[in-house]
Image (tube, coloured by chain):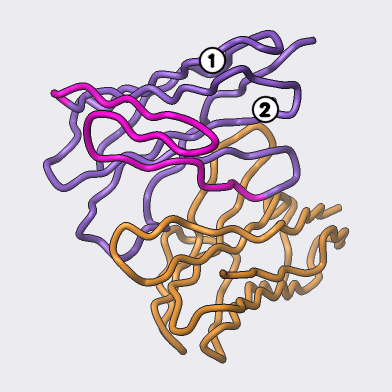
Amino acid sequence: LAKTTQPISMDSYEGQEVNITCSHNNIATNDYITWYQQFPSQGPRFIIQGYKTKVTNEVASLFIPADRKSSTLSLPRVSLSDTAVYYCLVGDILSSNTGKLIFGQGTTLQVKP
Amino acid sequence: SQTIHQWPATLVQPVGSPLSLECTVEGTSNPNLYWYRQAAGRGLQLLFYSVGIGQISSEVPQNLSASRPQDRQFILSSKKLLLSDSGFYLCATDRSSYNSPLHFGNGTRLTVT
């Protein structure tokens, strides 16, 4: 399983765009990249998933460069309610045991008014 | 869509007492099921996972056990709780298909006193 490295914490202000970068230098050919969001006293929630280039949904965008050794989660115009812990996970797309992926400490995003 | 029920939401138990946490899943059949524990300010630690009725795999040695008596029921137990068993316990599931994101329950906050 590829190890991931993300900043422990980040601060932002309401209305700003936030970019959280995750390093995964040992990513394998079959690995995909998934981001989750966790609010206090709740379980993590799936945000976005990608394999290469750019993926966008109604919540966020995920940018993955050609070498796939890193990825960036982009949250447009954050609000106070985006304050949460964000986890980057890397795992094998051929595996049906998604839950065996490793959740690290994640990035604690604090959005200020 | 999948729904995960966990109860109770909070629990305070004395050291040496037994534990039983239940998780049930709706909206899917033959899911993979997972038990995670999260200590304060830490990432998620995978405790057990199950790919079918009666099939349990343990990821770390510990004072806990798990059982899956029915397809969509997953139980976490202990005969005698330790102080170190305190934490936030999360049940999760995926659709047992490749690349399927995890869906988490709302968790149980366990405090062992």
The colour assigned to chain A within the rendered structure: purple
Q: Element at badge 2?
A: helix
**Cα–Cα span, label 2 and label 1:** 10 Å
- For the image, the number of numbered tags is 2
Name the subunit of mark 2. Answer: A
> Label 2 crowding class (10 Å Cα cut-off): few <14, some 14-19, many 20+?
some
User: Do the numbered discs 2 and 1 sit on residues whose CB atoms are within 8 Å?
Assistant: yes
Q: Where is residue B41 in the image (x, y as percent from the top left)?
A: 65, 32
> Label 1 crowding class (10 Å Cα cut-off): few <14, some 14-19, many 20+?
many
Name the residue beneath numbered marker 1: A18
Residues rendered magenta in the picture = A43-67
Q: Nearer the viewer, residue B1 or A86?
A: B1
Relative to B95, B9 lies left or right: right
Q: Which of B18 and A46 is in front in this view?
A: A46
Name the subunit of mark 1. Answer: A
Q: Is residue A70 above or below residue B48?
A: above
Relative to B20, B3 lies left or right: left
**Residue shown at 75% from the left, 22% from the top:** A80
Relative to A44, B28 lies left or right: left
Q: Where is residue A73 in the image (x, y as percent from the top left)?
A: 43, 25
**Residue shown at 54% from the left, 45% from the top:** B44
Name the residue beneath numbered marker 2: A82
- Residue A4 quadrant: top left
Q: Do labels 2 and 1 share a chain?
A: yes
Q: Is residue B8 above or below residue A10?
A: below
Q: Nearer the viewer, residue A37 or A41?
A: A37
Q: Report if residue B30 lies within the magenta region.
A: no
The colour assigned to chain B within the rendered structure: orange
Q: Element at badge 1?
A: strand
